[in-house]
Image: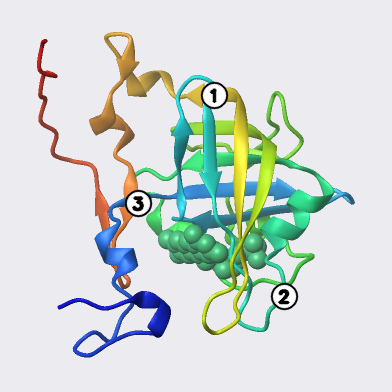
Amino acid sequence: MFYDPREGLRPPLTHNPINALVAPRPIGWISTISASGSANLAPFSYFNAVSADPAMVMFAPNAKPDGERKDTFRNLLEVPQFVANVVSAGFEEAMNATSADFDTDVDEFDAVGIAAVPSRNVRPPRVARAMAALECEVFQFVELPRSRTGRGSNLVIGTVVGIHIAEACIRGGAVDQLSLAQVARLGREDYTIVERIFEMQRPRS
Ligand SMILES: Cc1cc2nc3c(=O)[nH]c(=O)nc-3n(C[C@H](O)[C@H](O)[C@H](O)COP(=O)(O)O)c2cc1C
């Protein structure tokens, strides 16, 4: 089949295929803080690295169904710093619990029972037990075009200013992906975990 997504979904599809076709997507478990000091934690799978050197990442918080800004984005407009905590196997239930639509003044670390520790170079705290976390400063906000339904979305590009990695996840001078066991998002409500790896050398010219 072929269709132009700008014209809406087409049978036999009943689900937007983008989530399934651009997958797996790593999950940035994003912590932010408001100007008054209230912390926030929520998962974003429209999340990825955009540059290794300089180290930069991006994620895209869209608007709530009622058009309001999500707390994460609201906080970033007040304090333009965030931590992208890595979600490893075993953290999926806690991560999912933090995606609930809590009131703005609710700290998801407290509400879900996730231990927080101070970050080194940014104000938002990080997930204490996360195997890895990237401390970031906002480099740029990009307002995306509104969807057919009028829903807004923003791209947040961040410069990484601090990297935490659990010693157990480092082997031979590199990150041991099997120990990190990242959880990633597929289409619908499906997820995958990095547990099978193969190696391939680049062609030599
Ligand atoms: C695995 C997962 C991935 C998600 N990815 C996104 C995303 O990329 N963008 C987005 O706006 N919401 C995403 N959400 C929904 C947000 O986590 C949810 O709207 C949350 O309540 C936002 O929290 P906040 O209002 O505290 O910022 C995702 C939820 C889950 C469970």
Tell me what residue is drawn at x 10 percent, y 17 percent.
203
In the rendering, at what x and y percent does residue 98 appear?
55, 62
> Residue farthest to the bottom?
11
Amino acid type assigned to the residue bearing label 2 in the image: Glu
Amino acid type assigned to the residue bearing label 1 in the image: Ile
User: Assess mark 2: CB under 8 A from ligand 1?
Assistant: no
Tell me what residue is drawn at x 39 percent, y 55 percent.
92
Q: CA distance from mark 3 to mark 1?
A: 20 Å
Q: CA distance from mark 2 to mark 1?
A: 32 Å
Tell me what residue is drawn at x 39 percent, y 84 percent.
7
In the rendering, at what x and y percent does residue 121 appear?
71, 24
Q: Can the viewer see residue 47?
A: yes
Of the image marks 3 and 1, the number of the one nearer the N terminus: 3
Q: Is residue 203 above or below residue 51?
A: above
Amino acid type assigned to the residue bearing label 3 in the image: Arg
User: Assess mark 3: CB under 8 A from ligand 1?
Assistant: yes
Residue labelled with disc 2: 68
Residue labelled with disc 1: 163
Q: Is residue 191 above or below residue 26?
A: below
Q: CA distance from mark 3 to mark 2?
A: 25 Å
Going by the image, does 86 lie left or right of 17? right
